[in-house]
């Protein structure tokens, strides 16, 4: 889980520690970004109202899951 403040634009730094690429994907956040293996990527989100916004790794959706919790 990632906790962020409501009504604020936030820069997420996503680190991929695996050797293979992964795609950060969230339908609710309307974001997707492929992050190469052993690298990192930036995704900007917000400002958002309070709530829970799930995300997942599109290449491994059964195990790569999380959520942004806006408070």
Image (tube, rainbow, N blue to C red):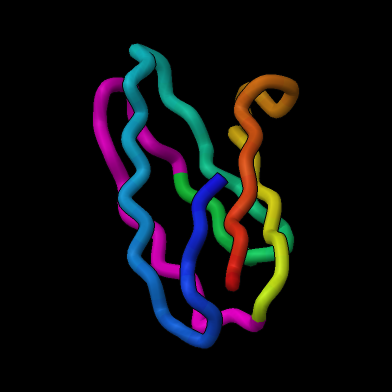
| Image vertical order of residue 33 relative to residue 16, above or below | below
Residue 55 is one of the magenta-drawn residues: no
Where residue 45 sits: x, y (%)? 48, 70
Left or right: 45, with 29 as reference point? left
Question: Could you tell me which residue is drawn at 36 percent across and 28 percent down?
Answer: 16
Question: Could you tell me which residue is drawn at 74 percent across and 22 percent down?
Answer: 62
Question: Could you tell me which residue is drawn at 51 percent across and 58 percent down?
Answer: 3
Where residue 61 sits: x, y (%)? 70, 28
| Image vertical order of residue 66 relative to residue 13, above or below | above
| Image vertical order of residue 38 relative to residue 15, above or below | above
Left or right: 64, with 20 as reference point? right
Q: Nearer the viewer, residue 66 or 21?
A: 66
Which residue ends up furthest to the left in the rendered image?
39
Left or right: 38, with 20 as reference point? left
Q: Which residues are magenta?
A: 34-49
Q: Nearer the viewer, residue 60 or 71?
A: 71
Instruction: Name the image quarter holding residue 52.
Output: bottom right
For the C terminus, the quadrant is: bottom right
How many circles with numbers are drawn on the protein? 0
Where residue 41 sits: x, y (%)? 31, 46
Question: Could you tell me which residue is drawn at 25 percent across and 31 percent down?
Answer: 39
Q: Nearer the viewer, residue 60 or 9?
A: 9
For the N terminus, the quadrant is: top right
Which residue ends up furthest to the top in the rendered image?
19
Which residue ends up furthest to the bottom in the rendered image?
7
Where residue 54 sits: x, y (%)? 69, 51
């Amino acid at each position: 889980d990632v906790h962020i403040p409501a009504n604020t634009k936030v820069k997420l730094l996503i680190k991929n520690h695996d050797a293979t690429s992964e795609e950060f994907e969230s339908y609710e956040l309307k974001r997707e970004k492929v992050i190469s293996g052993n690298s990192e990527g930036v995704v900007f989100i917000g400002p958002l109202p309070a709530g829970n916004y799930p995300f997942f790794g599109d290449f491994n959706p059964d195990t790569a899951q999380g959520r942004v919790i806006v408070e």
